[in-house]
Image: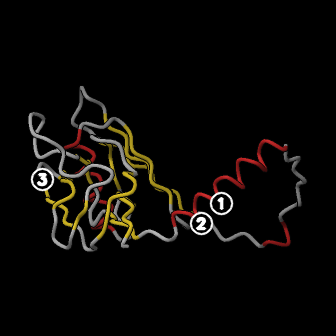
Amino acid sequence: MDLKDIQNLIKFVAKSGASEVKLEMKDIKITVKTESNKAETTTTILQQAPVATSQIPVVSQVVSQADVAEESSESSNSKEDSKYLTITSPIIGTFYRKPSPDKAVFVEVGDTVSENTIVCVIEAMKLFNEIESEVSGKIVKILVEDSSPVEFGQPLFLVDPS
């Protein structure tokens, strides 16, 4: 992540009205905090130093049967979902299922979409970007709730291509 991306993130958070956003990646952790009373933005950037694996003590962990069952159900869901195609977010912003509050949603579970069918809009910096499907098929699952923030590459919809 370069300085320009960080500056764009700060501007986006300031304009969005969010009070705090945390972003963690492999080697960098960014926290952007804003206060509604002030136009001041505080940014904290921590870069982690590489740690040799031989210095890390091994900690044994007790795993309950409920945890194992939960993990197996998640893995079966991921195996089940792997046969579907995913429509992902091309930008960071706020996900909306409708073009406006008084209109109907673009797509529902069970709807058939083709390439270039508009499936949602994502608001980024006060611009509403129509997101088109890049695949054809039937919407199986909507992975994001209406009016919630999304990140670049985040899965939005699962589509059954058959």
Residue wearing tag 2: 79
Local crowd at mark 3 within 10 Å, few (<14), some, or many (≥20)? some
Pick whichever, 5 or 159, lies toward us.
159
Residue sitting nearer the eye, 112 or 66: 112
Mark 3 in CB contact with mark 1 (< 8 angstroms)? no
What residue does disc 1 label? 75
Q: Is residue 75 above or below residue 14?
A: below
Residue at the location (44% across, 68% down)?
A: 84
Amino acid type, callout 3: Phe
Residue 135, image x and y in percent? 28, 74
Q: Real-space Cα distance between discs 3 and 2?
A: 34 Å
Please tell me whether mark 1 sits on a helix, a strand or a loop.
Answer: helix
For residue 128, which numbered disc appears in the image?
3
Q: Is residue 91 left or right of residue 117?
A: right
SS of the residue at dot 2?
Answer: helix
Above or below residue 60? Residue 53 is: below
The residue type indicated by label 2 comes to Lys
Pick whichever, 91 or 59, lies toward us: 91
SS class, disc 3? strand
Q: Quadrant of the C terminus?
A: bottom left
Mark positioned earlier in the residue sequence (3 or 2): 2
Residue drawn at (18%, 53%) of the image = 121
Q: Position of residue 81 (x, y in %)?
A: 51, 63
Residue 79 percent across, percent down from the top left = 59, 66
Q: Determine crowd level at label 1: few under 14, some 14-19, many 20+ residues with C-alpha closer than 10 A.
A: few
Q: Earlier in the sequence, mark 3 or mark 1?
A: 1
Asked if the residue under mark 2 is in contact with the one under mark 1, i.e. CB atoms within 8 Å, the reply is yes
Q: Is residue 53 above or below residue 108?
A: below
Looking at the rendering, in which quadrant would you find the N terminus?
Answer: bottom left
Task: Please give left or right for residue 152 compared with residue 79 in the image.
Answer: left
The image shows residue 3 at horizontal and vertical percentages of 32, 67
